[in-house]
Amino acid sequence: MSEIFTIGEVLVEVMAKDIDQGFDEPGTFIGPFASGAPAIFIDQATKIGSSGGILSRVGKDGFGQLNIHRLQQDGVDVRFIKMIESKTTGIAFVAYQENGDRDFIFTLKDSAVATLNEDDVREEMFDNCKYFHIMGCSAFNEGIMLAMKKAITIAKKKQIQITFDPNIRKELMEDENVKQFIQFVLKHCDVFLPGEEELLLITGASTEEKAMKLVWEMGISCVVVKKGRNGSRVYYDNTCIDIDPYPVQEIDPTGAGDCFAGTFVSLINQGKSIIEAAQWANAAGAYAVTKKGPMEGTSSLQELQVFIDQIKGGE
Ligand code: ATP
């Protein structure tokens, strides 16, 4: 079984071709591209050299097949992705604005993965597992939250480390059930990987310093705050270290955080230090934003080394 395991949405993304192209009139869209934040995470973690698997559901359709083939090709254990006939694979339509903002239309709530539930979670999925990764964006219905809670309880019993990337939109956090779920995950999490704004949103603190005080009180041992084009900041063992970013021209920001987290967790699983793992993770996030398409920017260590050499050569 897999050293790193995750749970959540596997979907396709369809992108508006032109900047400022809206959803309210006909236009050209490109895709489908393999997507879903947990899927991107596990694809990256596996490409970086750990064994990885995912629990999910897709429809018995071309979109589901596209995702399964892509993950399989990259070495991910896809045995726990169930294809179901009664629902279709989830779709995310994305449009980009001139100022860099993105608009989304999701079909997730009525899709195959929305039927994922507690009965899908089985103890043997966690045999030999060392890290179980949870993403807040997957907490979009009660059944999935119950499934994730059951999985966390099993993982804790087996002394598996829980890694948590909130990756959550403000609106989802307004739901009382989601808020409680996030608190449950925080209580059990060992490695916390929030974005800068998410850290404040989740803790309710007004500054990063105040937020970190609350996080330490929860007993989380390692926190890495993702800071977009400014790199990342690692909090570990009473130290706080800024990890420099790699300067790149951003083409598509989707998936950067997932590639960052996949690299970080995969490398600590392989025994690298927190700092070294975060340095590679910064490179993986920067590499991801140079590629159009959510999962098109996943990378191996060899690819990242070439990318780093190119940047250093150009300095
Ligand atoms: P998302 O949810 O869109 O995947 P996120 O908010 O979880 O993103 P970001 O902070 O945007 O995560 O990106 C993750 C990491 O990728 C950053 O910490 C940084 O190391 C790298 N990164 C992201 N954007 C850039 C950029 N424009 N230039 C250089 N590095 C970047």
Image: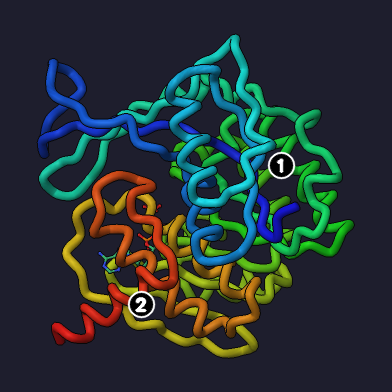
- Percent across and percent down for residue 118 are 78, 31
Type of residue at label 2? Gln
Label 1: few (<14), some or many (≥20) within 10 Å? many
Residue 110 in sight here: no
Q: Is residue 165 shown to the viewer in this render?
A: yes
Find residue 36 and report its horizontal and vertical position in percent. Answer: 47, 40
Residue 238 shown left or right of residue 130 in the figure = left
Between 138 and 28, which is closer to the camera in this rendering? 28
Name the secondary structure under disc 2: helix
Disc 1 secondary structure class:
helix
Kindly identify the amino acid type of the residue bearing the numbered disc 1: Met
Residue at disc 2, CB closer than 8 Å to ligand 1: no
Residue that mark 2 sits on: 305
Q: Which residue is pictured at 30% across the width and 75% down the height?
A: 306
- Per the rendering, the mark at residue 148 is 1
Q: Foreground residue, 256 or 47?
A: 47
| Residue occupying image coordinates x 76% and y 58% | 129
Relative to 32, 99 lies left or right: left
Nearer-the-camera pick, 105 or 132: 132
Quarter of the image with the C terminus is bottom left
Contact check, label 1 and label 2, Cβ < 8 Å: no
Name above or below for residue 14 compared with residue 286: above
Q: Is residue 81 above or below residue 224?
A: above
- Residue 270: give x, y in percent of width and height: 63, 75
- The answer to which quarter of the image holds residue 297 is bottom left
State the CA–CA distance, disc 1 to disc 2: 35 Å
Is 73 placed left or right of 27 in the picture? right
Quarter of the image holding residue 159? bottom right
